[in-house]
């Protein structure tokens, strides 16, 4: 069933994915400034996000917030969104069709925010936005050029914050990638963007 209604970067109503319509309590839209220099893209809302209607507010969100703070940023300085806006049942990975159904919403959000750098949190958003397989552990911290919705974009590949909860040895790589993102766009401390150097 195709029935969508959007307002800017927000999706107000959507019934395209029957399983997600069934499992969600609400649509979880992106948060943060619409002119943010940094846009973080996760996979899909989990239980806490579904309950509170905001991306990355559960345990993964705490890891992200801590890394942002260590990099000199506040959560409110950046835009945070997901590839899929409705919680999948039992927190399973979003299916390809669900990612496809939500793709135009993510494209629209990226277009409106027009960030200097997109940071992909985990394999799903990395592969979605780079349109190729991503070895996320090996590639974490790398900055690559991508075409997203016909537009050239800078993308920094990053681990999903939850990876650091399963494997504490990934914490440094995660924090380093977030620090690189802050440094590259010069948002921490209001410095200069260094993206041209890449
Ligand atoms: N994991 C995600 O990928 N997104 C969220 O919003 C929360 C957890």
Image (cartoon, rainbow, N blue to C red):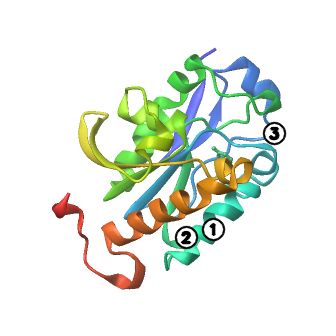
* Residue 111, placed above or below residue 117: above
Picture quadrant where residue 194 is located: bottom left
Q: Are marks 2 and 1 in contact (CB under 8 Å)?
A: yes
* Residue 42, placed above or below residue 172: above
Residue furthest toward the bottom? 189
Residue assigned mark 1: 65
Q: Label 3 vs label 1: CA separation?
A: 24 Å
Q: Residue 4 at x, y = what percent?
A: 58, 29
Picture quadrant where residue 89 is located: top right
Residue assigned mark 3: 25
* Residue 85, placed above or below residue 4: below
* Residue 134, placed above or below residue 72: above
Q: Secondary structure at mark 3?
A: loop
In screen coordinates, is 104 left or right of 91? Answer: left
Q: Label 2 vs label 1: CA separation?
A: 5 Å
Residue 55 appears in the picture as rendered? no
Q: Residue 69 at x, y = what percent?
A: 57, 76
Label 3 environment density (alpha carbons within 10 Å; few <14, some 14–19, many ≥20) = some
Q: Residue at x 53, y 36 (%)?
A: 123
Q: Are marks 3 and 2 in contact (CB under 8 Å)?
A: no
Label 1 environment density (alpha carbons within 10 Å; few <14, some 14–19, many ≥20) = some
Q: Residue at x 74, y 28 (%)?
A: 92
Q: Residue at x 42, y 26 (%)?
A: 133
Which quadrant would the N terminus be assigned to in this image?
A: top right
Residue furthest toward the left? 196
Residue assigned mark 2: 68
């Amino acid at each position: 069933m195709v029935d969508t209604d959007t307002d800017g970067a927000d999706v107000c109503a959507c019934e395209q994915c029957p399983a997600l319509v069934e499992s969600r309590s609400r649509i979880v839209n992106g948060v943060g400034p619409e002119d943010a220099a940094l846009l973080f893209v996760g996979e899909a809302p989990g239980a806490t996000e579904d309950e509170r209607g905001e991306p990355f507010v559960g345990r993964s969100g705490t890891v992200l917030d801590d890394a942002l703070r260590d990099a000199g940023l506040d959560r409110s300085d950046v835009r945070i969104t997901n590839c899929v806006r409705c919680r999948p049942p039992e927190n399973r990975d979003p299916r390809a069709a669900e990612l496809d159904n939500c793709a135009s919403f993510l494209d629209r959000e990226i277009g409106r925010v027009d960030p200097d750098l997109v940071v992909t949190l985990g394999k799903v958003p990395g592969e979605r936005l780079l349109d190729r397989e991503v070895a996320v552990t090996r590639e974490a911290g790398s900055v690559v050029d991508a075409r997203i919705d016909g537009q050239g974009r800078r993308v920094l590949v990053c681990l999903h914050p939850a990876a650091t909860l399963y494997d504490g040895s990934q914490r440094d790589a995660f924090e380093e990638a977030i620090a690189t993102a802050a440094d590259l766009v010069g948002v921490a401390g209001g410095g200069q963007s260094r993206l041209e150097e890449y």
